[in-house]
Image: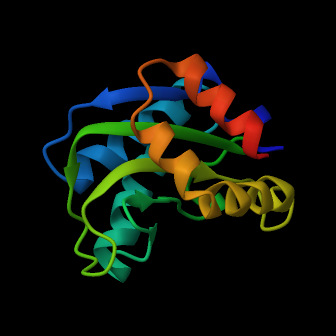
């Protein structure tokens, strides 16, 4: 379940990031601190965007960086960061980005319930706006619990 993956320890608000790469790195560092990934997974997320382009930008103002399980995933995890200042990923339709939900999974199926809940959450524009403007981590959790 989404709420089991995004906890207060995997959330950071009003994060400073100079560019999309630093923003992805900061989200990945939360995954690493939680024990969900090895450090090399962070570089893999960045390299995926460099190789494929801004495919991780999935809706207005929001990105969902991830990489392959073999790139250093230890267990399924998610982190959520909001940025103090939005950054551009190079997606003309949805830039600039202010919300980043980083993701890792050990396989291609075990996380489907969490992703389904994430889709429901992303459809709620008001909830996304409230998360982006949240002042504390518990507020983010409360918003998410209402939606999923």
Q: Is residue 47 left or right of residue 16?
A: right
Q: Give the farthest residue toward the left.
A: 18
Q: Position of residue 30 (x, y in %)?
A: 49, 31
Residue 17 to residue 47: above or below:
above
The reply to whether residue 38 is visible in this rendering is no
Q: Position of residue 35 (x, y in %)?
A: 63, 28
Which residue is more in the foreground, 30 or 87?
87
Q: Residue at x 54, y 50 (%)?
A: 126
The reply to whether residue 130 is visible in this rendering is yes
Q: Quadrant of residue 47?
A: bottom left
Q: Give the farthest residue toward the front.
A: 126
Q: Is residue 32 left or right of residue 124?
A: left
Q: How is the image coloured?
A: rainbow
Q: Residue at x 28, y 77 (%)?
A: 91
Residue 91 to residue 47: above or below:
below
Q: Position of residue 15 (x, y in %)?
A: 29, 31
Q: Residue at x 59, y 51 (%)?
A: 103
Q: Can you say which quadrant of the picture contains the N terminus?
A: top right
Residue 61 to residue 145: above or below:
below
Residue 89 to residue 148: above or below:
below
Q: Is residue 109 left or right of residue 138?
A: right
Q: Residue at x 17, y 51 (%)?
A: 19
Which residue is more in the foreground, 2 or 146?
146
Which residue is more in the foreground, 59 or 70?
59
Q: Quadrant of residue 51?
A: bottom left
Tally of marks: 0
Q: Position of residue 61 (x, y in %)?
A: 36, 60
């Amino acid at each position: 379940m989404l709420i089991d993956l995004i906890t207060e320890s995997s959330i950071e608000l009003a994060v400073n990031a100079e560019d999309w790469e630093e923003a992805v790195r900061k989200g990945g560092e939360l995954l690493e601190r939680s024990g969900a990934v090895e450090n090399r997974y962070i570089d893999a997320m960045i390299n995926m965007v460099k190789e494929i382009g801004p495919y991780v930008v999935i809706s207005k103002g929001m990105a969902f960086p991830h990489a392959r399980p073999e790139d250093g995933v230890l267990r399924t995890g998610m982190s959520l960061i909001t940025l103090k200042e939005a950054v551009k990923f190079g997606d003309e339709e949805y830039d600039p980005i202010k919300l980043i939900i980083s993701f890792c999974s050990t396989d291609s199926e075990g996380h489907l319930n969490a992703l389904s809940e994430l889709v429901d959450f992303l459809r709620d524009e008001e909830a996304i706006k409230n998360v982006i403007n949240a002042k504390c981590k518990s507020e983010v959790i409360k918003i998410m619990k209402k939606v999923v």
